[in-house]
Image: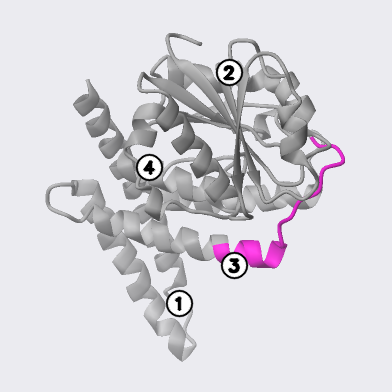
């Protein structure tokens, strides 16, 4: 229990028998429930988790290799089925890459109603220990996720998050992202719905764990998703009931950008600077639109 809320920790795990015991035994005593989602492990991850005794209570869910997004979704939905009162659902990796000492800082903004969803941000820590390739990739994805969300996102790939139960109750789980790229899709969904997103500095933890990501496939899939969801979010706000002056200004600037690029097909690049300027203005207008939608939802809640 923390700040009047039950606290559940969702731990997606696939072949994490080497790390899962440490993850569970280092959780702070104020955690009410840990949900280990064993996503098709073949190394006895669930068996190791079952042997952990003490606080907090541990529930184990079994999936058959459906992907990290599906595992996290299953954990959130399990907590919804367990608790009717307000709670905060935290996501921690099963490989020990998230420091339990940062858990309270991640939970606090949500439990105290400063944010609806908060996430860890490793860049403030200087990315200590983070491999160079991963650091560069994180910066690139941060830039494109910022465009897709209409607000600054420094470290979208950090999956250390906390989400209020009111957000989870309103989720369309059938449309939720199921594989890698889950944090990016979740952030876009939060921005689209007008939820408040908080960012909390956390430490980078890297050891002997290995990543199952195929880099080329990951960037193609996530990049395509970011482009698609960016346009979906903006188009959904053209509805007269949801539209704002900044939404329509962003559309106008975006259209000017594409119009300016049209001569490129004949080899002329003279209008490219205008296109870049127009798209920059479109992003600024889009940020204002996101702020407006967030204020609207906050006032509705009050």
* Residue 281 counted in the magenta span: no
- Left or right: residue 185 versus residue 61 is left
Asked whether disc 3 touches disc 1, contact meaning CB atoms under 8 Å apart, the reply is: no
Residue 272 locus on image (x, y percent) = 46, 72
Return the residue at label 3.
Answer: 220
Q: Residues within 10 Å of mark 4 (few under 14, many from 20)?
A: many
Task: Point out residue 291 in the picture as x, y percentages from the top left corner.
Answer: 32, 36
Q: Position of residue 136 (x, y in %)?
A: 71, 51
Work out whether 201 lies above or below 19: above
Q: Which residues are magenta?
A: 206-221
Tag 1 near tag 4, CB within 8 Å: no
Dot 1 or dot 4, earlier in sequence: 4
Mark 1 in CB contact with mark 2 (< 8 angstroms): no
Image disc number at residue 270: 1
| Count of numbered badges drawn on the protein | 4
Question: Which residue is tagged 2?
Answer: 105
């Amino acid at each position: 229990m923390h700040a009047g809320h039950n606290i559940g920790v969702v731990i997606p795990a696939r072949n994490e028998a080497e790390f899962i015991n440490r993850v569970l035994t280092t959780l702070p005593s104020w955690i009410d429930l840990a949900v280990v989602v064993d996503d098709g492990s073949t190394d006895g991850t669930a068996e190791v988790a079952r042997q952990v005794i003490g606080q907090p209570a541990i529930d184990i869910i079994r999936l058959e290799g459906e992907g990290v997004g599906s595992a996290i979704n299953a954990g959130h939905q399990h907590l919804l089925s367990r608790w009717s009162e307000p709670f905060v659902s935290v996501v921690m990796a099963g490989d020990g890459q998230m420091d339990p000492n940062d858990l309270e800082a991640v939970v606090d903004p949500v439990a105290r109603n400063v944010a609806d969803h908060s996430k860890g941000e490793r860049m403030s820590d200087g990315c200590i220990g983070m491999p160079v390739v991963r650091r560069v990739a994180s910066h690139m994805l941060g830039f494109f996720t910022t465009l897709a969300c209409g607000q600054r996102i420094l470290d979208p790939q950090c999956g250390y998050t906390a989400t209020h139960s009111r957000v989870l109750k309103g989720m369309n789980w059938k449309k939720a992202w199921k594989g890698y790229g889950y944090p990016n899709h979740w952030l876009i969904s939060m921005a689209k719905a007008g939820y408040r997103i908080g960012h909390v500095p956390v430490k980078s933890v890297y050891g002997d764990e290995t990543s199952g990501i195929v880099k080329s496939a990951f960037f193609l899939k996530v990049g395509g998703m970011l482009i698609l969801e960016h346009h979906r979010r903006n188009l959904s706000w053209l509805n007269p009931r949801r539209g704002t002056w900044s939404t329509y200004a962003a559309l106008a600037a975006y259209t000017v950008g594409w119009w300016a690029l049209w001569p490129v097909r004949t080899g002329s690049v003279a209008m490219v600077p205008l296109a870049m300027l127009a798209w920059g203005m479109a992003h600024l207008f889009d940020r204002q639109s996101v702020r407006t939608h967030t204020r609207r939802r906050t006032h509705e809640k009050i």
